[in-house]
Amino acid sequence: MTCTRPIWAEISRTRLAANFRTLRDAAGPDTELFAVIKANGYGHSLAICAEALAAQGARWFGVTGVEEGLQLRAISPQSRILAMSGLWPGEADALIESNLTPVVWQPDHLAMLAHAASRRNLAPGSLPVHLEIDTGMSRQGVHLAGLTALLDQLPPALRIEAVMTHFYAPDEPEPTAEQMRLFTLAVDALVARGMRPSILSAGSSADLLDHSTTAITSLARRVGATRMIRAGLGLYGYGPGAQPTTGLQTVLAWKTRITGIREIPAGATAGYSATFRAQRPTRLALLPLGYADGFSRLLSSRGSALVHGQRAPVAGRISMDQTLLDITGIPQAAPGDEVVLIGEQEGGSITAADIAALTGTIPYEVLCAISARVPRIPVE
Ligand SMILES: *Cc1c(COP(=O)(O)O)cnc(C)c1O
């Protein structure tokens, strides 16, 4: 279904490509840069991102699960695709048939894969998996205490291609050092059993940008593995802090148009619960989007959007499908004019980090929240 409402997100392929090259240079020639495009490319579109990144030589993609993996496989026959959240009952056959690689950490993952592998008489070691170690997130991953028992159940068809972990505070040296210590113990336990993972996968955009976890590089060297860094947010132009990160450019611009303008006298109200009351004769612009599009209701009377490069404040409550801007200070604004919710316009700029600061969240969530009904349009 094509969207004919004037609301869209432009995805810059050249900026995404440039960010990938910047991050790859930061990773260095001996490290494999793994592109995290889970959750529909952090809201940027799986298809647009995979295509632009593959053109830059990206070989590894991380998606949410098998469902997204199948979507990606249909457009990317060659790439390696990791189902980062493991697999669920009923998915093992499709996973194997489409040559997806699962993250595994619990016995039922191994059992589901063993079952599907035996039906196909897969040769020993022919099904690569990435084993996640829980070093402190208590989320996914096998804890060190359960590692031996899990490895005892490893079906012959499976081969541990990579051992991975996730740092919960990559910007803080102490917890990361402790997580590295646990990860090293896990890797050494595998090696002691004669297993030779060819990849050690740890670290995300933050590690890449501040080079905080070089310890993993020496561990990889010691066990003869390649280091892999899984970068997501940096690809889309955002860094760990609230500020724009040097060398990266934001990839997504979210736009709409003014659909109508009205003038209301001092004292008139606007929006649900009349939280906006005009203090003076006021010009309001109607935008054809609301919280159903992912423009958070928390931005009511707090957020803004760019009109002719200037920030026009949101007037009153954001509705499901409508938002009002106070454009009293922008007399040249007219119906049909482009409005920028995230992005740049005539020298003005609003980022997902700006919105996150106003709504008490992180840029990741702002980007992912742009709803599916907003079309993503590839641009240069
Ligand atoms: C999302 C995710 C990443 C990417 O993190 P960024 O901060 O976006 O770079 C890496 N590894 C795992 C396991 C993840 O879930």
Image (spheres, rainbow, N blue to C red):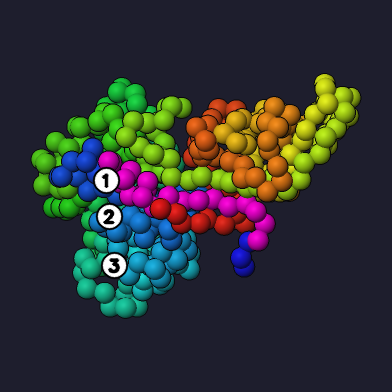
- Establish if 231 lies above or below 70: above
Residue 34 is situated, as x and y percent measured from the top left of the image, at: 30, 49
User: Which residue, given by chain and number where applicable, does mark 2 sit on?
Assistant: 56
Residue 14 part of the magenta segment? yes
Category of crowding for the residue at label 3, using alpha-carbon neighbours closer than 10 angstroms: few (below 14), some (14–19), many (at least 20)? few
Q: Secondary structure at mark 3?
A: loop
| Residue drawn 45% across the image and 66% down it | 71
Q: Residue at x 41, y 30 (%)?
A: 244
Whole-number angstrom distance, CA of label 3 to CA of label 1: 20 Å
Q: Residue at x 80, y 29 (%)?
A: 282
Q: Which residue is mark 1?
A: 21
For image coordinates 37% across by 46% down, the residue present is 15
Mark nearest the camera among 3 and 1 is 1
> As drawn, is 151 to the left or to the right of 226?
right
In contact (CB < 8 Å): disc 1 and disc 2: yes
Q: Secondary structure at mark 2?
A: loop
**CB at disc 2 and ligand 1 closer than 8 Å:** no
Q: Examine the image and state in which quarter residue 61 appears.
A: bottom left
* Residues shaded magenta: 4-23
Q: Is residue 133 left or right of residue 379?
A: left
Viewer-nearest residue: 17 or 57: 17
Residue where numbered disc 3 is placed:
78
Q: Is residue 331 left or right of residue 354?
A: right
Residue 370 percent across, percent down from the top left: 58, 47
User: Is residue 263 rendered to the left or right of residue 309?
Assistant: right
